[in-house]
Image (cartoon, rainbow, N blue to C red):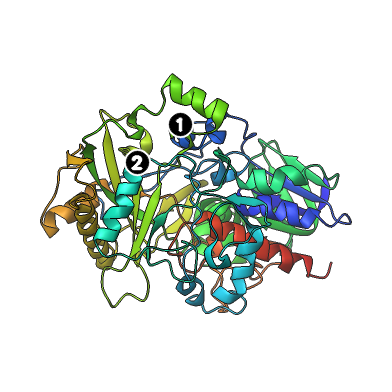
Amino acid sequence: MEYDYVIVGAGSAGCVLANRLSADPEVSVALVEAGGQDDKLEIRMPAGFAKLFKTDYDWNFTTAKQGEMAGRELYWPRGRVVGGSSSLNAQMWVRGCQQDYDQWEIPGWSYEDVLPYFTKAERRIGSNHGGVYGSAGPLFISELRSPNVTTAAFLKACEELGFERLAELNGRSNEGYSPTPVTQDRGRRWSAADGYLRPALKRPNLTLITEANVDRVVFDGTRATGVEHSGGAVLRARREVILSAGAIGSPYLLLRSGVGAADELRDAGVPIVHDLPEVGKNLQDHLSSGVFVTCKQPVTLTKAESIGNLLRYIVLRSGMLTTNVGEAVAFLRTSPEEPAPDIELIFAPGPFIDHGLTPPTGHGLTVGVVLLQPESRGRIGLNGREVLIDPRYLAKEGDVKRLVAGLKVAKQVFATAAMKPWAGGPMAPYDAPESDEELELWVRDQSKTLYHPAGSCRMGTDADSVVDPSLRVRGVEGLRVVDVSIMPTLNRGHTHAPAVMIGEKAAELIAKTPS
């Protein structure tokens, strides 16, 4: 039960680390995952991801009541399975833009610094204008096999509104519109576990431990020496413990282990190992609102689960069940003062209501509106010994204004000539708000997470940051955090791609550290 490296969390970054670190036959690696194996059909079948929500494959988190959102508690799904959230997500591979990484202003983490790690991960299948993507990496990045007919209409609507068509979405600038690149291989989800972990498990020096919930990091003084997981078993780490448990799990484990704000630890009855006040702070998430309309023709995903579609998927790996739901995107600036896009539109050729948990009553279409650069900051904390999630959505007025502006653009999309054959009237719960006041009320009453929490173990060069630019936790030894919790600010994209990039870069940093 002793290894050179113990990695907590078999999600996007953890799978990358397990593969890259175990490539050295001289070291031993343990990867510990709270969930079980990723062998369910709904994981493999792209359109099935919503069926995994609120099941044993999901942490099924709930936020604290949000004062600026009608006092609502919001549901946050996160993957509790091998592959982590890359086994539950909508497979959208969206890196963000150059500004996202340059604005961190951290040596070694500029756009030029991180770009090679994106391309190292990618195996682009399909178009690759300008060589934007890598072509030999572990992760298949493909085009949708069977996009819906209404998705082409959405793209035509974007053209009609004067937006720029992107030759490839994941270049230096993402301002414009594009079909969504997806992590799929011939119509099948291709998670971080598929690309990185499964090939590496053939190595004798890599051990995967599933259904083992880690309770805390074990310290000898201020040096991390291992982790204790459910049942009281301790896995010892000769070199390092690496937390890749995500923007909720990693800060929570630090706090449970005595690394965090001293007052908070005392209140929770946790012995203090190191007073590090910023642990759990700086929490950010992409908040999403949307416009829902009926579809005039019965062509949407509402009937995707028919026997015919299921057989077509199983036999041919094509048809509606290969959809990732978010089939096209547009990244826009709501004002010329924005340095880069601040709003994302996501088109779904179906009524994606209540995270897909509410069965649609008919054919409908969705344009989701995503706030890309929230000003509001929340925290991960301890509620006794349990986790507290308080994103403090819409605490800053600018966040509300940007979402209202984005909803106005989404309404314009459905008013175009391109969408006229398809888009009908409003579809419940959407009630077609018109004024800024009505739109703001819609934002507060109905917005939901887009599943991108980040920032809660902020990386920085300052003494207040949780991890340094090598991702080592400040004030202790033998402990790093490697996941999107280290991001100082969110990217103008989605978080799976940066999680993989962070894993790739961290693996090199760790491998270069003297033993």
Local SS, label 2: helix
Drawn side of residue 145 relative to residue 428, left or right: right
Choose between 315 and 290: the one closer to the eye: 315
Residue drawn at (63%, 40%) of the image: 82
Q: Amino acid at mark 2?
A: Val
Quadrant (top left/top right/bottom left/bottom right) for the C terminus: bottom right
Choose between 442 and 46: the one closer to the eye: 46
Q: Position of residue 182 (x, y in %)?
A: 51, 49
30 up-or-down from 129: above or below? above
- Can residue 439 be seen here? The reply is yes
- Can residue 384 be seen here? The reply is no
368 up-or-down from 261: above or below? above
Give me the C-alpha separation between circle 1 and circle 2.
Answer: 24 Å
Q: Position of residue 267 (x, y in %)?
A: 49, 55
**How many C-alpha atoms fall within 10 Å of the one at disc 2: few (<14), some, or many (≥20)?**
few
The label on residue 51 is 1
Residue drawn at (58%, 29%) of the image: 40
Quadrant (top left/top right/bottom left/bottom right) for the N terminus: top right
Q: Position of residue 446 (x, y in %)?
A: 25, 46
Q: Position of residue 409 (x, y in %)?
A: 23, 59
Question: Which of the marked residues, 1 or 2, is nearer the chain's N terminus?
Answer: 1
Residue lying furthest top in this view?
Answer: 307
Q: Amino acid at mark 1?
A: Lys
The label on residue 149 is 2
- Camera-side mark, 1 or 2: 2
336 up-or-down from 183: above or below? below
Drawn side of residue 197 relative to residue 326, left or right: right
Residue drawn at (55%, 26%) of the image: 314
Figure quadrant of residue 160 = bottom left
Residue drawn at (55%, 65%) of the image: 132
